[in-house]
Image (spheres, coloured by chain):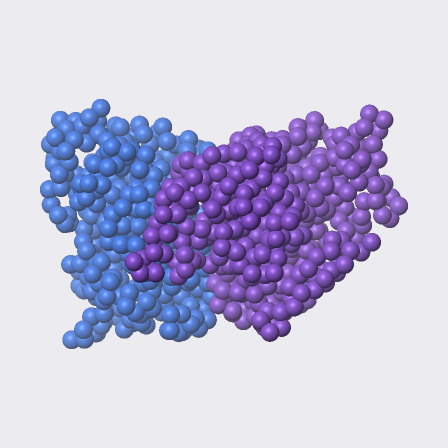
């Protein structure tokens, strides 16, 4: 038998009777499982999830569910096909032994695999003071249960809601509160809402949008402590400027934490930023060498992106979970040269204060912005982000149907500022600084990150803890 | 005599029943300059790019060249009667920000969640009743015309109800539309005596149609009634109200587009299924396939074969060609939907096709306003036809086609049947 025939036989054999374990029973895990079956994998498939629920959709949680339009338990993800898997729901994975190829579960069970997909995603960052976080009325919002509980409290309704952090989730929660007629205060450490994702220029528009809808928005401030009543219910927040806000519901939207702790000791390149992998979803070990049997997809994956100078990007976007999972699953049951890359142009959407905000590309990669279509005053516009004369991202407010055009320009390394539209031009199309926070500001968590993009200049940088 | 381009051949009436071999030839030059200066875009990728390109206008007032193709040889350029008479823009013939504003004003009265999320789906019982009635009327017949007896009556009744147009006026506007369409020719035959003769009648028809719409709107202004037109005349949205002229123009567009395209789609769907008995049998066995099936039928025989009011506002580099500023651009959806670069085995009918993002409703900001309604009508009509009609056989293949190229469709589809099931 020739070598090629042997390899082909191995692939066939693996597809017929291999063992695949997927850790993470959310969008990426489900779509990966479906793709594996689509690709003809008939071996054993185990899906492990720490929540007791079948895979559900998260985007509605901070919108339709909070508004009370859709019950939290009605967000189950549609199944594209039968997956015929052994579902282990309600039990978390707690460890990975790559030497014996086993996943350890919280109940002590060991699940053997031939190939493993890590799709454990992220969780909400909790309010850092555990005693204060435990007060009744203090919430984060990431899971179905979170949304159901918060919806119940919003329906009462509270006298005021305090939202800490004006990223997308925080802004969406504030928007829902206003729609429900609930007074809301938003406290944001940065200069404006959405500033991390979209920069200060757009952030200023978002700030105005919030204020126009009656949000008590306070930027450049932090919450120093939360105060409860004797019954253990939150009543007041003290802010960093010495002022206080009375509120009986507090939503901490402080970003997300990648679920990588269970991989400690596994020897994988897993850390604060996610699990490093190649564009095909194959995980790197701690030395940066690609593994053969461990794959990553979804929010927790972090792969180099060709369009962004091969920087390692983790994308917490819905379509990244779907397409990344499909790619990883395909590669799990194929060998070179049939590997596929996951080269998604990132994109997300958010609905808030009656505006549909959409974006393609990686806005924070840009340092300039130019309005290209529509009217900022009417809050219907498109804007492009540029870096060194090239377009790298675009954002639209109620102008989403144009994103395809900008996406194409980004993919083709189009010029920045982009060619002006023939009509509906904003009064001023001059590029200006996009005003992103300095990405080099150290985070609170030490980590090793790669810098540089060409093989010869790539080095590691250690980011020390601040306190 | 200069040899005709593939596009000109595709537009000849003789090739109406099967333009696809000419489209195949046409796609070899994705962006093909025609002798009259029009740029015809025939490949999927390029059409999608232009549909999303803000340098492309949909406003015919901005295009200096008449968009009706001129024939080679002597003769004056042929103007399009509809455009000549209808001076006010509607949502399909204007650009943002006007387009966006007018569409926003109309959408809540049609299908715009969250305002009226159930408006279209709530029409289903009515649609079902109409379809059932039409099929019941065929009982006892052995030969039917799938156009006159089936495809035409449904959309016209539905659009009249949605818009609030009296159904008894249908024969009048049916005549106007037919007359206008029969004079609308973008091919080499446009300069013929016959078409020129028809144009005079078409101008008159559009004028009368416009007057009809204006009168109807006046009536609703005096006395509000049911339907979308009355609501648009009488209710102020956050952005005010449309002017009467713009509203009349849009009313015309909706009456026209609301049934014309759907008639062709139902007729073509029946025709296509009768040509593919395996697919028809599969649909009978698995009625749930009607949903992906209608998408495939839309791809297979696009109701709108191309669109003709777009033009370049700047030089646009695409597919190795520069479309110069000011040039008319025709987007050939019918060809793009058979582009093998985009669709696997595009000439095969596959009701279960999964990757089927066809251009049957276009894309971008001018995406078909009526798509949700059209989908529902065709799903019910074609689904019930497949279920209830016993042993249908095509009498004549190909059937006679209508003259106009944009809204390509059979004039009649005669079908022999054994009976109608309950």
Q: At 45% from the left edge and 51% from the top edge, which residue is drawn?
A: A332
Q: Give how far across and how far down residue A381 sits, in percent.
A: 58, 57
What is the quadrant of residue B127 in the picture?
top left
Residue A380: tell me if it is visible.
Answer: no
At 67% from the left and 65% from the top, the residue drawn is A460
Left or right of B152 on screen, residue A87: right
Q: In the rendered view, would you say B396 is above or below A393? A: above
Q: Of A356 and B72, which appears nearest the observer?
A: A356
Task: Tell me, yes or no, if residue B320 can be seen here.
Answer: yes
Looking at the picture, how far across and down is residue B417, in whole percent?
Answer: 13, 33
Task: Looking at the picture, tell me which residue is in the foreground, A59 or B407.
Answer: A59
A276 to the left or right of B165: right
Q: Position of residue B215 (x, y in %)?
A: 39, 42
Indicate left or right for A183 with B268 as reference. Answer: right
- Count of numbered circles on the image: 0
The answer to whether residue B25 is left or right of residue A337 is left
Residue B176 to residue A411: above or below = above
| Colour-to-chain, blue | B
| Residue plotted at (17% across, 45% down) | B275
Residue at left 56%, top 57%?
A284
Q: Is residue A460 above or below residue A84?
A: below
Closer to the camera, B142 or A100? A100
Q: Which quadrant: the C terminus of chain A?
A: bottom right
Residue A218 locus on image (x, y percent): 78, 48
Residue A135 versus residue B381: which sits nearer the camera? A135
Colour in which the image shows chain A = purple
């Amino acid at each position: 038998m020739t070598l090629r025939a042997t390899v082909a036989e191995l692939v066939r054999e693996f597809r017929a009777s291999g063992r695949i374990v997927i850790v993470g029973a959310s969008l990426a895990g489900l779509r990966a499982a479906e793709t594996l079956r689509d690709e003809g994998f008939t071996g054993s498939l185990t899906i492990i999830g720490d929540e007791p629920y079948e895979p559900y959709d998260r985007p509605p949680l901070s919108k339709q569910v909070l508004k009370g339009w859709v019950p939290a338990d009605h967000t189950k993800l549609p199944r594209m096909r039968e997956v015929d898997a052994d579902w282990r729901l309600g039990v978390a994975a707690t460890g990975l032994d790559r030497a014996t190829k086993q996943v350890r579960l919280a109940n002590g069970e060991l699940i053997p695999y031939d190939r493993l997909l890590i799709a454990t995603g992220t969780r909400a960052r909790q309010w850092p003071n555990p005693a204060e976080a435990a007060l009744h009325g203090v919430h984060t919002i990431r899971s179905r249960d979170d949304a159901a509980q918060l919806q119940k409290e919003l329906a009462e309704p509270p006298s005021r809601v305090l939202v800490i952090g004006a990223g997308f989730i925080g802004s969406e929660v504030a928007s829902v509160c206003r729609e429900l007629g609930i007074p809301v205060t938003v406290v944001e450490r940065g200069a404006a809402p959405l500033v991390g994702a979209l920069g200060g220029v757009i952030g200023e528009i978002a700030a105005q949008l919030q204020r126009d809808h009656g949000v008590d928005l306070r930027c450049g401030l932090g919450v120093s402590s939360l105060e409860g009543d004797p019954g253990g219910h939150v009543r007041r927040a003290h802010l960093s400027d010495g002022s206080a806000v009375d509120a009986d519901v507090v939503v901490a939207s402080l970003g997300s934490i990648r679920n990588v702790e269970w991989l400690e000791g596994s020897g994988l390149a897993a850390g604060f930023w996610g699990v490093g992998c190649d564009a095909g979803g194959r995980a790197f070990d701690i030395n940066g060498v690609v593994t053969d049997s461990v794959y990553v997809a979804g929010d927790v994956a972090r792969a180099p992106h060709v369009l962004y100078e091969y920087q390692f990007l983790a994308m917490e976007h819905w379509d990244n979970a779907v397409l990344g999972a499909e790619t990883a699953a395909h590669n799990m049951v194929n060998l070179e040269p049939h590997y596929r890359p996951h080269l998604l142009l990132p994109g997300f959407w958010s609905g808030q204060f009656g505006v549909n905000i959409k974006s393609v590309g990686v806005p924070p990669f840009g340092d300039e912005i130019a309005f290209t279509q529509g009217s900022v005053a009417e809050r219907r516009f498109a804007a492009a982000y540029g870096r060194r004369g090239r377009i790298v991202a675009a954002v639209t407010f109620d102008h989403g149907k144009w994103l395809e055009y900008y996406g194409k320009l980004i993919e083709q390394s189009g010029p920045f500022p982009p060619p002006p539209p023939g009509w509906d031009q904003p009064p001023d199309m001059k590029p200006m600084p996009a005003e992103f926070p300095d990405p080099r500001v150290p985070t609170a968590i030490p980590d090793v990150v790669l810098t540089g993009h060409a093989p010869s200049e790539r080095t590691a940088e250690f980011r020390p803890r601040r306190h | 005599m200069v040899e005709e381009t593939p596009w000109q051949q595709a537009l000849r009436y003789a090739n109406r029943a099967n333009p696809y071999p000419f489209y195949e030839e046409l796609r070899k030059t994705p962006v093909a300059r025609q002798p009259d200066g029009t740029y015809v875009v025939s490949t999927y990728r390029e059409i999608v790019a232009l549909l999303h390109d803000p340098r492309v206008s949909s406003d015919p007032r901005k295009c200096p060249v008449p968009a009706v193709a001129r024939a080679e040889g002597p003769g004056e350029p042929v103007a399009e009667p509809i455009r000549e008479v209808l001076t006010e823009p509607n949502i399909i013939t204007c650009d943002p920000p006007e387009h966006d504003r007018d569409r926003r004003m109309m959408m809540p009265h049609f299908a715009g969640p969250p305002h009226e999320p159930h408006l279209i789906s709530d029409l289903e019982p009515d649609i079902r009743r109409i379809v059932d009635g039409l099929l019941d009327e065929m009982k006892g017949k052995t030969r039917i015309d799938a156009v006159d007896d089936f495809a035409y009556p449904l959309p016209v009744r539905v659009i009249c109800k949605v818009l609030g147009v009296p159904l008894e006026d249908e024969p009048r506007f049916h005549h106007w539309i037919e007359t206008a369409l029969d004079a609308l020719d973008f091919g080499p035959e446009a300069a013929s005596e016959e078409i020129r003769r028809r144009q005079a009648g078409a101008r008159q028809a559009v004028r009368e149609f416009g007057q009809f719409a204006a009168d109807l709107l006046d009536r609703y202004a005096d006395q509000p009634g049911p339907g979308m037109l009355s609501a648009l005349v009488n209710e102020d949205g956050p952005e005010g109200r449309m002017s009467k002229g713009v509203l009349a123009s849009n009313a015309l567009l909706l009456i026209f587009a609301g049934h014309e395209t759907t008639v062709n789609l139902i007729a073509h769907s029946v025709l296509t299924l009768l040509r593919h008995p395996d697919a028809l049998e599969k649909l009978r066995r698995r009625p749930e396939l009607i949903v992906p099936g209608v998408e495939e039928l839309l791809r297979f025989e696009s109701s709108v074969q191309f669109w003709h009011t777009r033009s370049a506002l700047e030089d646009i580099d695409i597919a190795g060609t520069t479309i110069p500023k000011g040039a008319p651009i025709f987007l050939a959806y019918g060809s793009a939907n058979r582009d093998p670069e985009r669709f696997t085995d595009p000439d095969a009918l596959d009701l279960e096709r999964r990757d089927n993002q066809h251009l049957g409703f276009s894309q971008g900001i001018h995406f078909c306003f009526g798509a949700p309604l059209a989908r529902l009508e065709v799903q019910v009509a074609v689904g019930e036809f497949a279920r209830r009609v016993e042993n249908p056989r095509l009498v004549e293949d190909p059937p006679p086609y209508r003259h106009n190229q944009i809204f390509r469709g059979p004039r009649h589809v005669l079908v022999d049947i054994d009976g109608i099931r309950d």
